[in-house]
Image (cartoon, helix red, strand yellow):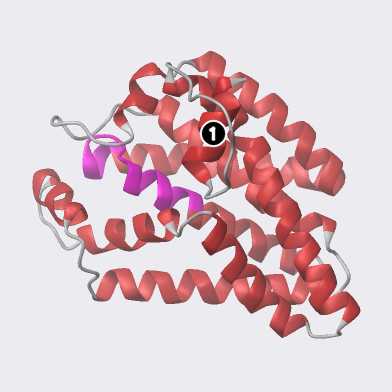
Amino acid sequence: MNGLITAFRTLTILPVPGRDSDEMASSLPFFPLVGALIGLMVAGLAWLVAGKYGWPAGAGVLCVVLSSFVTRGIHLDGLADAFDSLGGWTIQRRLEIMKDSRVGSFGVIALVLVLAAKIVSIARLAGSGNYLVLIVPFIISRIMQVQLIVALPYARAEGGIGRKFVEGATIYHLIVAYIVGFLLCFAAGNIKAILIAVGASLFCLFLAAWMRRTFGGVTGDLIGMGSELLEAGTLVVLGFMV
């Protein structure tokens, strides 16, 4: 169970007792489970704010605040850094820009658009009483994190935080993550959630090809960007389906 402990410590701020896994990649199959727990927390807050107090817009804002807090905002940080790096003309320059702690205009625009998409989508779903389905985007985005990690080499020659996950990742980790994630999606949102997850997986293939061409592989920031785009995109799709 050390892999589960590592997954929680990597993806959340939740205090989990125990020892981390010696093999960081062994945590990958548990990523969808961690996503489901985050989604369950979001769904519970949406039910409380929108269901009990009749404030869907407030639910949208507070749920985004909660999910950002629980994850330490690491994926949002990756989103901003990755979009800022698009101003570079070469792979090396893009990787250098991503390491800069400052946020530029591209990063700010990406953050605003993604956060707005999340807020209005959660508000719409909460307002319609579809609380349980709010778990689905958090599961799907964590499945796709594993897909990117397994599909791509690590882009930085000098290494980085995500390197230990990427270098030890195998197709086995992805298969287990898919099985666990798809079962959780079905439990939270029935067959429609499975179809959305399949669509997200296909999109992730194109995203991985773009990352390989644009950055030479994947980094922690790019994993965060992919996670945020898929999470927000899934919320928007679910919002349209209400």
SS state under label 1 = helix
Q: Which residue sits at x=73%, y=34%?
A: 182
Which quadrant of the figure has residue 174? top right
Find the magenta span and give its range: 212-227
**Quadrant of the snapshot with the N terminus:** top right
Residue 14 in percent (x, y) is at 58, 47
In this rendering, is residue 18 above or below 37?
Answer: above
Please name the residue shown 84% across and 69% down the image.
47
Q: Quadrant of residue 110?
A: bottom left
Residue beneath label 1, please?
7
Residue drawn where x is 76% and y is 67% of the image: 45
Type of amino acid under label 1: Ala
Residue 16 visible here? yes
180 is within the stretch colored magenta: no
Image coords of residue 98 (percent x, y): 21, 54
Residue 127 seen in the figure: no
